[in-house]
Image (cartoon, rainbow, N blue to C red):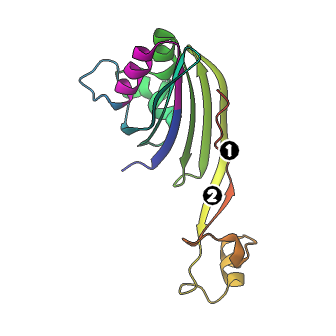
Amino acid sequence: MPNICEYEMKIKGKNRKNVEEFIEILKADYTNPHHFYRVYDADVSQPIAENEDEFAAIVIGTCAWSVECCMFFNDYRLKDGKTGSDIQSETRRLNLTVEIFSKGTGRGFMERYIVDEGNIITDETVDYFTYRYDDSEWDSIEDFNKENGTHFTKGDFDENGDAHIGGMEWRYMI
């Protein structure tokens, strides 16, 4: 089973039908020639809104491995003989701009992309690690830090016992 990658994507365009079609491509199965590879789900978290002759929606979902592997045109898919479409082709065809944030906690990364009508404007990947601390599993925070090579205090962990190193802020620029 692959590592699961969580993503959030803003889709923006001048034509409402094109934004709707792109959302359907995200949800499409392999019977549709316009589908992405190993995208497991795509839920609209912010419905399509109109603002000064532009339409935008936000979709959240999961895919295998990374957004780069599952949604972009790349050698991995060519070697695997996979069919379907990709972000570059679909944003060009539908005259859309998308901005995508993702995190793959199993592999320790976050991604951010901006694609404007087929052109990759932003392509960033940074390290992102999640650590979980539970008092019942460790004698002390010092023992936890020694084992993990970290320098956390108990105050660094949220209510779920998680602390993070790296990553990026998920704030849309489009």
Across and down, in percent, residue 138 comes to: 59, 85
Quarter of the picture containing the C terminus is top right
- Image position of 143 with respect to 110: above or below: below
- Residue 36 in view of the camera: no
Q: Is residue 98 magenta?
A: no
**Could you tell me the amino acid type at mark 1?**
Val
- Magenta stretch prevailing secondary structure: helix
Using residue 112 as the reference point, say whether residue 4 is left or right of it: left
Q: Secondary structure at mark 1?
A: strand
Which mark is on residue 129?
A: 2
Taking the image as shown, residue 35 lies to the left or right of residue 138, namely left
Pick out the residue farthest to the left: 31
The tally of labels here is 2
Q: Nearer the viewer, residue 67 or 172?
A: 172
* Boundaries of the magenta span: 10-26
- In this rendered view, identify the residue nearer to me: 53 or 64: 53
**SS at circle 2:** strand
- What whole-number distance in Å separates the C-alpha atoms at marks 1 and 2? 10 Å
67 relative position to 143: left or right: left
Q: Residue at 73% across / 76% down in the picture?
A: 153
Q: Is residue 45 above or below residue 20?
A: below
Q: Are marks 1 and 2 in contact (CB under 8 Å)?
A: no
Q: Position of residue 124 (x, y in %)?
A: 67, 35
Kindly identify which numbered label has been placed on residue 126.
1
| Residue 166 appears in the picture as rendered | yes
25 in the magenta segment:
yes
**How many residues crowd mark 1 within 10 Å: few (<14), some (14–19), many (20+)?**
few
Vertical position of residue 121 compared to residue 130: above or below: above
Residue in front for this viewpoint, 12 or 86: 12
- For badge 2, the amino acid type reads Phe
